[in-house]
């Protein structure tokens, strides 16, 4: 019987899941994800976590508990230090497997593959092989799994560049027929970590809400890399966080090119990197004064009505600015 | 050019010595007060951490006093500190201040590079006087830290409340004013002796606590509401795990302390996670092994590395049977609440120890 690898549907799931799945499948393992975020998952996570951890981490821990209850053989919690040279992810990713082990007792074996491309990728293959050896002894098979995973990652990112959100891209790769209505007449850049806006429970399906209200929504994943780099070049100092770099760069790009009607940022309460990145972005937008900018903060107490009211008000503002609404 | 910089433990004493040694004008940041904090809080991003807010308050107060150049350290993450300067500069710009901000980016995070780059900002100053002032400044940091280490022991035994603190304040001022190494050594020696002579009280149950956590919170008594003093006055001997001199030793000379941290943290945290998260975990293990009675972690609210560490050291506390308390601080922190928690914690430690005896 094949071994079951559990992947929590939280945090970087939204950035890498299809590739991870292919890798483990190639090694002959079965991949099981946790269920969609629900009240129980959040409650479990909140109870097990330290108070001050951010909502995405609490949700992640809830998903780990969900997988434990599902009885998987392994849980995949990679230690993702860096996914590109000279940039880190937020500090929580660096200690994630350690933290989870301390917070949740009696876990199945954790697969804590270390991904650290900060200086070079020398250690990466070693880590891939170390991970693969848990399932097969044939190195060639492990390498094959790795390359198939890379291929999948490229495909995944390609689909998102066509205007699909990570959720939709994952669904379409799983063979579902995904239809996206992304043709509203107001263009909105929704700049946020994918785990803050893709989890429909914690962010009330913000992408679809905006689309229903008539917005064409750009998330970070849909924006071409070169546009982000163009934006980043205008900054005095690039951010040393990968996703902070993307948010700042995309924000600056839209500010320079004026090709969106409004910008919304979403961050988790107490998010360290976002506290600085969004403040800077907001300053740049205020100084320019031409594009409306709104920040939303979410935590485990966020109410649907509050988010909805603010989105509606923001859309009204944009419509009024365009002359579609007259007061 | 009138230079200023933020407060951080004995940094002020050191930088003053260094810059005056090479004839550069400085404007010393005034002592951190509630006004400093209010100013910082008013203009900083809401979820920025306390050190950023206090730094910003420092800058506003010194710019008001006529400073025109700010020196700040940069960094390459993953801790937010590396991006402080960028944000602070833009905030101060929006407030209408006219100034130059020198953000020294340590290419490899080493203090030696910091000084090298800094020297490029001051052409025309010979390296000999610069080196001389630098060495004296560093000696002052080491002396100030030694004096404080003794303070945290002797104050737990002071003959009358406030006496040892008074002596310490007096001798810190003398350290600050000392003109050469000889004078510095004498002041330090005398200060330690004087504290010792005024601390003879013997506690029935002697409790020892290690205070671990984020470095700024440990170095700036204002930011942690003087937790060490509060503990000392409850009769507790305190060991603080971060000093500016340790930071200097580690980053300037890459001493093997990092290896020691990794060894101690093994099994709990397998790598450096930025900020002082690894230190916090390692020090908790270290002082638990040393037989301390309790561990208190202090950190700024929303500090990610320390939050990761918080979850981990709670487990260490259970595994090694040592009480651990985590305290996070922001601008809304009230003194009374913390005092109550400290007293309760110390009570708990005393009871635990009583049972043992």
Image: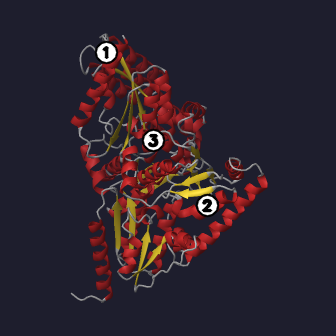
Q: Residue at x 30, y 71 (%)?
A: A308
Q: Residues within 10 Å of mark 1 (few under 14, many from 20)?
A: many
Instruction: State the CA–CA distance, disc 1 to disc 2.
Output: 62 Å
Chain designation of label 1: B
Residue B339: percent from left, percent from top: 25, 31
- Where is B15 relative to A127, above or below? above
Q: Is residue A99 visible?
A: yes
Seen as rendered, the residue at the extreme front is A1
Residue B157 image label: 1
- Which element carries disc 1, helix, strand or loop? helix
Find disc 3 in the rendering and name its residue.
Answer: A103
Residue B5: percent from left, percent from top: 41, 46
Considering the image in quadrants, where does the C terminus of chain B appear?
top left
Q: Are marks 1 and 2 on the same chain?
A: no
User: Which is in the foreground here, disc 2 or disc 3?
Assistant: 2
Q: Is residue B194 visible?
A: no
In this rendering, position of residue A21 left or right of residue B149: right
Chain designation of label 2: A
Instruction: State the CA–CA distance, disc 3 to disc 1.
Output: 39 Å
Q: Would you say the residues marked 1 and 2 are in contact, meaning their CB atoms lie under 8 Å apart?
A: no
Residue B256: percent from left, percent from top: 61, 32
Q: Residue at x 23, y 40 (%)?
A: B334
């Amino acid at each position: 019987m094949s071994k079951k690898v559990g992947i929590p549907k939280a945090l970087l799931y939204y950035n890498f899941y299809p590739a991870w799945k292919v890798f483990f499948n190639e090694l002959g393992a079965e991949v099981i994800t946790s269920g969609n975020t629900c009240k129980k998952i959040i409650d479990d996570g909140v109870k097990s976590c330290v108070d001050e951890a951010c909502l995405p981490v609490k949700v992640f821990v809830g998903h780990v508990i969900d997988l434990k209850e599902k009885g998987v053989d392994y849980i995949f919690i990679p230690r993702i230090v860096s996914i590109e040279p000279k940039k880190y992810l937020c500090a929580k990713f660096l200690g994630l497997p350690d933290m989870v082990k301390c917070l949740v007792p009696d876990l199945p074996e954790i697969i804590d593959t270390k991904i650290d491309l900060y200086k070079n990728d020398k250690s990466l293959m070693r880590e891939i092989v170390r991970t693969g050896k848990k399932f097969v002894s044939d190195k060639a098979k492990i390498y094959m799994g790795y390359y198939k995973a890379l291929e999948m990652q490229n495909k995944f990112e390609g689909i998102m560049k066509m205007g699909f959100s990570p959720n939709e891209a994952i669904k379409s790769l799983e063979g579902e027929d995904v239809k996206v209505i992304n043709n509203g007449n107001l263009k909105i850049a929704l700049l946020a970590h994918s785990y803050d806006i893709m989890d429909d429970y914690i962010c009330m399906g913000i992408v679809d809400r905006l689309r229903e209200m008539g917005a064409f929504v750009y998330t970070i994943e849909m924006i071409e890399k070169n546009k982000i780099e163009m934006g980043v070049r205008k900054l005095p100092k690039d951010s040393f966080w990968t996703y902070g770099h993307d948010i700042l760069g995309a924000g600056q790009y839209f500010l320079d090119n004026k090709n969106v009607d409004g910008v919304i940022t979403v961050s988790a309460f107490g998010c360290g990197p976002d506290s600085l990145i969004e403040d800077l972005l907001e300053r740049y937008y205020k100084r320019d004064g031409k594009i409306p900018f709104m920040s939303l903060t979410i935590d485990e107490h966020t109410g649907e009505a509050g988010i909805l009211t603010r989105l509606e008000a923001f859309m009204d503002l944009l419509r009024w600015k365009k002359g579609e609404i007259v007061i | 050019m009138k230079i200023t910089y933020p407060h951080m433990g004995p940094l002020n004493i050191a930088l003053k010595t260094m810059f005056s040694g090479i004839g550069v004008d400085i404007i010393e940041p005034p002592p951190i007060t509630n006004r400093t904090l209010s100013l910082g809080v008013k203009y900083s991003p809401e979820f920025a951490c306390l050190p950023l807010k206090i730094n910003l308050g420092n800058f506003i107060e010194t710019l008001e006093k006529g400073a025109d150049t700010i020196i700040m350290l940069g960094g390459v993450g993953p801790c937010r500190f590396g991006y402080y300067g960028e944000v602070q500069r833009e905030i101060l710009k929006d407030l209408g201040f006219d100034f130059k901000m020198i953000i020294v980016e340590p290419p490899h995070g080493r203090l030696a590079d910091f000084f090298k780059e800094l020297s490029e900002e001051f052409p025309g100053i010979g390296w000999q006087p610069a080196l001389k002032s630098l060495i004296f400044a560093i000696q002052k940091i080491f002396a100030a830290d030694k004096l404080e280490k003794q303070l945290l022991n002797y104050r737990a035994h002071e003959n009358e409340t406030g006496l040892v603190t008074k002596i310490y304040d007096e001798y810190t001022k003398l350290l600050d004013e000392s003109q050469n190494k000889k004078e510095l050594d004498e002041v330090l020696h005398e200060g330690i002796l004087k504290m010792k002579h005024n601390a003879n009280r013997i506690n029935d149950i002697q409790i020892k606590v290690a205070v671990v956590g984020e470095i700024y919170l440990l170095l700036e008594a204002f930011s942690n509401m003087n937790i060490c003093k509060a503990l000392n006055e409850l009769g507790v001997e305190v060991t603080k795990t971060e000093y500016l001199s340790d930071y200097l030793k580690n980053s300037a000379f890459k001493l093997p302390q990092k290896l020691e941290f990794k060894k101690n943290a093994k099994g709990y945290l397998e790598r450096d996670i930025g900020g002082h998260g690894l230190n916090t975990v390692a020090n908790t293990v270290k002082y638990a092994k040393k037989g301390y009675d309790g561990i208190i972690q202090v950190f700024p609210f929303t500090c990610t590395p320390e939050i990761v560490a918080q979850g981990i050291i709670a487990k260490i506390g259970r595994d090694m049977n040592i009480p651990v308390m985590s305290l996070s601080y922001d601008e809304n922190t009230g003194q009374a609440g913390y005092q109550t928690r400290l007293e309760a914690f110390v009570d708990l430690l005393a009871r635990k120890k009583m049972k043992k005896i």
